[in-house]
Image (tube, rainbow, N blue to C red):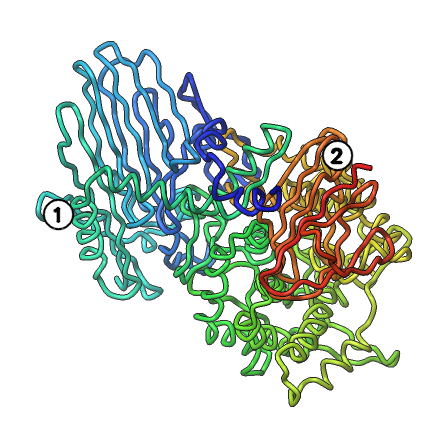
Amino acid sequence: MLREQIREFRNTLDLKAFLDSYDFVWDNLKYHEGTIREIINDRIAHIPKDWGNGGLIGNGLIGANIYKNSITSMKWGIGRGDIDGPTNCPELGCLQQRLSLGDVVLEVKNPIKKESLSISLRKAEVDRVIETDKGTLKYSSIAYAKKDCIIIDAEWEGEVAFDLSYVPSHGMTLKHHAAKAHEVPERCFPPAAEQKMADNIEIYNQKILNESLSPEGQFSIALASKEAGKNHKIWYISIGFSRHGFTSEKEAEELIKQVMAIDLNEIYRSHQKHWEDFYRKSIVKLPEKYWERFYLMQLYKLGCCTRPGNLHIIDNMGVWPTLSAWPAAWWNLNVQLIYSSMQKANHLELIESLIDTLEHYDETLSENAKPLGIDDGWFIGRSAGCDMKSYMPSYEDIMEENPEHVIIFELGNITWALHCVYRYYKSTMDQDILKRFYPMLKKAANSYLRITYKKEDGKWHLPMTSSPEYPGPIDPTSNPVRDANYDLALFRWALITLIESAKKLGIDDEPLMDTWTEHLENLTDYSMDETGYTIGKDLPLTVSHRHYSHLLQFFPLHIVSEDKEAERKVIEKSIKTWMSMPEYLQGYSFTGSAAMLAALGDGNYAYKRLSGLKDFLNPNTLYTEGGGPVIETPLSANESIHYMLMQCHGGKVKIFPAMPDVWRNAEFYGLLAEGGFEISARYTDGETEFVYIKSIAGEPLIINPNFKAGFVIEPKQEMKYETLENGCYQFELKAGEDMLLIKNSR
């Protein structure tokens, strides 16, 4: 009976009762003058405080952050994740960057007595109530899940007076807007938006300049409204985009007309059904309301920012662009953290945007690697726009090993991103995914093979590359070093994974197999000293390092293991050394160390580090650093929570491996484990109550269910299993089979 209940739990859970208690509510909303925090770099404009008190909506492509713009106004900072363009300004960097799309502003004309704002996670909408001396205005706003249209549904009582309008922003990149005006040459400014009316639809066309300063693309904002009854009006906003050519107006206009033709009740029904299906993919229940609501909010944000079919990845902005020094995708941590929690959370559909984008830009990624003198490599540097173009030093400069020529040369970035794709495969054991992944990783590894060289010690070594974010004498975010642990870890993981993948795919004639095997057997070891892992050869960790680029071999790659005593000692020393210098640590330093400590089984310390993230968060859980907002860090905290609830690396699954003392009760349903297993489990009064496992692929399962006094199996027919060491058991389940392990109460 219990097994059937667990099977159906996600389908039968009362989502209204579960989710509605986790709404984000501002009961007495006020306008806050000033900025979120002091910005370190004075070239970057300050972010308004109310940006962190905004209501977030999104449908995977478009969205808005809805927050107070003044005492009497509220703005929708609208965004579309694939709209970017060249800066055409060397002072700001030459990569493609996200563009400012302007704002929709609602201005109340009467004195405001009180107002409130709330984010409904279940309904994926923002609601606001404004009480004035002339009556009350209420509105709700969604980014419609089925069509790319933002809807504002307003009703009012009395004589409330208000206006709603679109305010263009000149189509410049967000970094242009953030920089001091005198630093932006006038030539960088595109022409102002062109306004027109068509069938009672306001349309604003904004040309995008190419690198020759000629109009090449365009985005269009369309705004329309209709009366829905007495004192009831609906506004519709759509965003069209044409990277080449000027068809965006037609796209925006047609979207508006399509959505306006749909009955409003059907819009809400289908929108809420989409989000209900989204939340049922997995359920996590935690004993602390703060962390349970936080976890749900990160899932919601991921669902707002991407969806299947996108040919762009989630970048630093997501669908909520604002002033920033980093209005693009950063590939040396940000992208990887954004996509880190989707696998276990059973939201594989969200990872499709990463896989599809990498495949779509295959030629561009190969072009990026051509300075190495090869046609079959892949590379992406620290940052790139939607076009994935990125700068790489020449082969000669790399092999010359002059630090000034390789100031920022992060060779491993693309391989780390591919680790996210591989985890998708491992969570399903889907051969079709592996077939797509294999040639990608092969190209990334080719770039490493091109620059490795063998020394007199018989070992393969790497020339100077950059370990992301470790400060150096030339650049505060890069210190080129030979045999960087960042690259050794990623190259070693790539070799291991390619060899295993070729065998899994039955590729017996892989021409590079001997090369991979020989490089793996003779690749130089990680650099370390008495304090643990160093940055690279002859470069110890002596100053605060916000990144954990020197520790990837442990987390998230897990090619060194906490279960091997000698390696565990080095890991423990390394984490202790890293955290002993807190000066420049950022929020992701806390989420990363929390996951590492959880992998070591230290739930209390992991919880303490996770809790350190709170100091970096805004009330709506958005996150900022010195150069502005970035989206990845709060999202990565969900993976830290996963590590406390369930781990799956090193060929085994661990259930509740790092539960802090304050979490005496917890449960999850439908999390995915490597090997292709869907797992649900409950933790009651500090011990495992049950573990439910369903096999997706029919792979062997090695699991530590973490029962204190053994277990019984349901169904009761004899289930063959083998008892292993360290609390582990091996089961053989066919694809589609399930079983329930229940704690032995005797």
Report the disc number at residue 660. 2
Instruction: Give the x, y percent position of residue 325.
Output: 49, 47
Q: Residue furthest front?
A: 717
In the rendered structure, which amino acid carries the disc numbered 2? Answer: Pro
Instruction: Give the x, y percent position of residue 472.
Output: 71, 54
Instruction: Give the x, y percent position of residue 355.
Output: 50, 65
The disc, 2 or 1, on the residue closer to the chain's N-terminal end is 1
Residue at 69% across / 47% down in the picture? 646
178 versus 427 height, above or below: above
Question: In this view of the protein, can residue 256 be seen by the observer?
Answer: yes
Instruction: Check disc 1 and report the residue beneath it.
Output: 196
| Left or right of 14, for residue 605 | right
- Mark 2 or 1: the one toward you: 2
Q: Are marks 2 and 1 in contact (CB under 8 Å)?
A: no
CA neighbours of label 1 inside 10 A, class few (<14), some (14 to 19), many (20+): few
- Front residue of 462/301: it is 301
Q: Secondary structure at mark 2?
A: loop
Question: In this view of the protein, can residue 471 be seen by the observer?
Answer: no
386 versus 16 height, above or below: below
| Left or right of 157, for residue 407 | right
CA neighbours of label 2 inside 10 A, class few (<14), some (14 to 19), many (20+): some
Quarter of the figure with the C terminus: top right
Q: CA distance from mark 2 to mark 1?
A: 59 Å
Residue at 62% across / 30% down in the picture? 615
Residue 604 falls in image quadrant: top right
Q: Secondary structure at mark 1?
A: strand
- Front residue of 321/35: it is 321
Residue at 65% across / 53% down in the picture? 693
In the rendered structure, which amino acid carries the disc numbered 1? Answer: Lys
Residue at 68% across / 37% down in the picture? 610
Q: Residue furthest left?
A: 199
Q: How many circles with numbers are drawn on the protein?
A: 2
